Image (spheres, grey):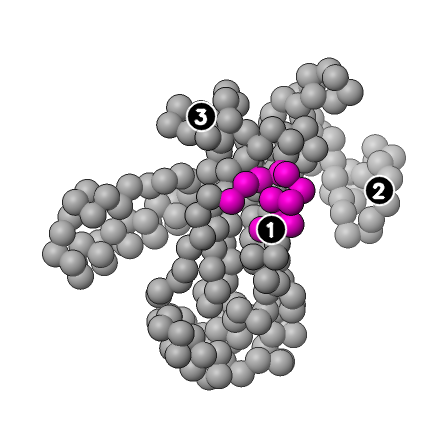
Amino acid sequence: MERAMSKDKIELNDRQLSCARIGSPEGKEYLSGMACAANFAWVNRSCITALTRKVFADMFKRTPEEMEMHLVYDVCHNIAKVEEHSIGGVMKKLLVHRKGSTRAFPPNHPNIPKDYQSIGQPVLIGGTMGTCSYVLVGTDKGMTETFGSTCHGAGRALSRNQSRKKLDHEQVLARLKNDGISIRVASPMLVAEEAPESYKNVTDVIDTCEDAGISRKVVKLRPVA
């Protein structure tokens, strides 16, 4: 990317960012790699869904269909999408790269499945394993001000390294157990990295997005496992 920027004389105001022209060899290679990663992630989500349904079926002796365990919506984040947006009153085709955000299209947008046309795109916002998560919908204001985007999570308050240094995984597990939350994890380090204290208050983040008018709250979810 940096070589491509130098070659095409592209200058950015943040050294942590880099880019390449979409039609360049570097741009095409990036988009191809991103598509592979997106496909891999989709398969993972599909496997998690299937395994979750199996566990519920085994536990409650009922089929997933009887328990209405239908997929509400499947969406990825941290990905670039080719979309049309109004720029200065003119519709243009853009490559919208949402990093730390996710799509939140408003009602009646042509890219929303017909089941959600009247309410807007479902927006799934994960909080933490010890607090809560949310389901939102997109808004017309978000379409004009943020290219139809909103947050995709609470955002980290501590880096992974800071979390490992400051938090004791046994204390984190004890607090979760006290709140009736059970987890299974391969490494104790992951417990500290993903502890509720490692993240910002997701409710504050969601309220900010709603106050800004770029998404609207629908459902608050509480973790149980």
| 209 within the magenta span | yes
- Residue 186 position, x and y percent, is 41, 72
* Residue 125 shown left or right of residue 68 in the figure: right
Element type at mark 1:
helix
| 85 within the magenta span | no
Q: Which residue is mark 3?
A: 118
Q: Which residue is mark 1?
A: 207
The answer to whether mark 3 and mark 1 are in CB contact below 8 A is no
Element type at mark 2:
loop
Question: Local crowd at mark 2 within 10 Å, few (<14), some, or many (≥20)?
Answer: few
For badge 3, the amino acid type reads: Ser
Quadrant into which the N terminus falls = top right
Residue at the spot 42% in from the left edge and 29% down from the top edge = 116
Q: Is residue 120 visible?
A: yes
For badge 1, the amino acid type reads: Asp
* Residue 84 shown left or right of residue 76 in the figure: right
Residue at the spot 57% in from the left edge and 33% down from the top edge = 139
- Residue 27 position, x and y percent, is 68, 34
Question: Is 180 located above or below residue 100 in the figure?
Answer: below
Q: Is residue 147 visible?
A: no
For badge 2, the amino acid type reads: Leu
Q: Which residue is mark 2?
A: 12
